[in-house]
Amino acid sequence: MGNNPAKVVIFHSEAAEDYAAPGHPERPARVSSTRELLKRQSDFVCDWRAVGTISEESILRIHDSGLLENLKSGSGNFDADTARLAGICDRAKDSAAAAIRAMEAAKKGEIAFSLMRPPGHHATRSTAMGFCYLNSIAIACGEARASGVKRVGVLDIDVHHGNGTEDIFLDREGYVFASIHQSPCYPGSGTSHAGKNCFNYPLPPLTARNYYRETVREGLSKLASEKVELIGVSAGFDAYARDPLAQELLEADDFYWIGQQIRQAGIPFFSVLEGGYSNDLPLLVKAYLQGIVS
Ligand SMILES: [Zn+2]
């Protein structure tokens, strides 16, 4: 059989597939169908691992205690798109725990992807919003900092601006944020750089694929020039041409290319699923991972 195929460590819990708001685009099939495709394919080996647990200390490094209390025992929805679903606090904790595990795997030199929901990058220090309850990638970056990483960066390729991550990172020592996103689009922020360490690359709807790619490379170069030691990728796949929530033009090949670029940057990194709402999400995740291992 020749060379050993490359290996991707996937952090996943089937509990991530057991909650839903009726008719909501952030639905269980996003993750379950991606899990099924990754298990079926043979282009690379997936090493499936449990997500483990998360301490409140890890959450409170990033979020206000008020948000955690609200998640645990508050009432009412968080916003029109972000419902208080049964068990959502535990599901958000699982998602953040998986991001931490992916970060830990990356520090050991593994290629790691968190295949979980809910997503996290819209959750600010104090507010759950935009389908997001806890900011998983920010929590993982906080954990990295606490474990001795001096500078950690987030590359946010979700088509929506990662306003929550920016809110948490803004002018915070040791953290750098770079986001490539459609503008105008939800949540409306990210139209220019912010503070000393948040770099925003807004792109108009229907941006040409080559230009979109070059802009992702620019964001990645910025993180490299900021000398980050570790990168968390907010891996959203909603810049896809047929995504129902945005108007960009990327194809599976572009996610492959993005995966390649990130790997070739030579900085340890881990990836956390954010958005991506088309039925083709499994193919896009697979293309991205294949780019990484190619
Ligand atoms: Zn998104």
Image (cartoon, rainbow, N blue to C red):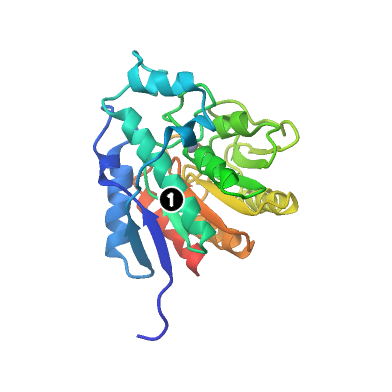
Pick the residue in front: 210 or 144. Answer: 144
Q: Quadrant of residue 242?
A: top left
> How far from the left and from the top, in percent, is residue 139?
51, 38
> How far from the left and from the top, in percent, is residue 269?
55, 55
Quarter holding the N terminus is bottom left
Judged from this view, the residue extending furthest toward the top is: 75
> How far from the left and from the top, in percent, is residue 53?
36, 42
Left or right, residue 170 beside residue 81 = right
* Residue depicted at 48% across the width and 22% down the height: 65
* Residue depicted at 65% across the width and 54% down the height: 229
> How far from the left and from the top, in percent, is residue 184?
60, 29
Q: Which residue is mark 1?
A: 101
- Please say whether residue 34 is visible from this viewpoint: yes
- Please say whether residue 277 is visible from this viewpoint: no
Q: Quadrant of residue 26?
A: top left
* Residue depicted at 67% across the width and 48% down the height: 150
Left or right, residue 260 beside residue 12 = right
Q: Secondary structure at mark 1?
A: helix
Pick the residue in front: 192 or 106. Answer: 106
Left or right, residue 159 beside residue 31 = right
The amino acid type of the residue labelled 1 equals Arg
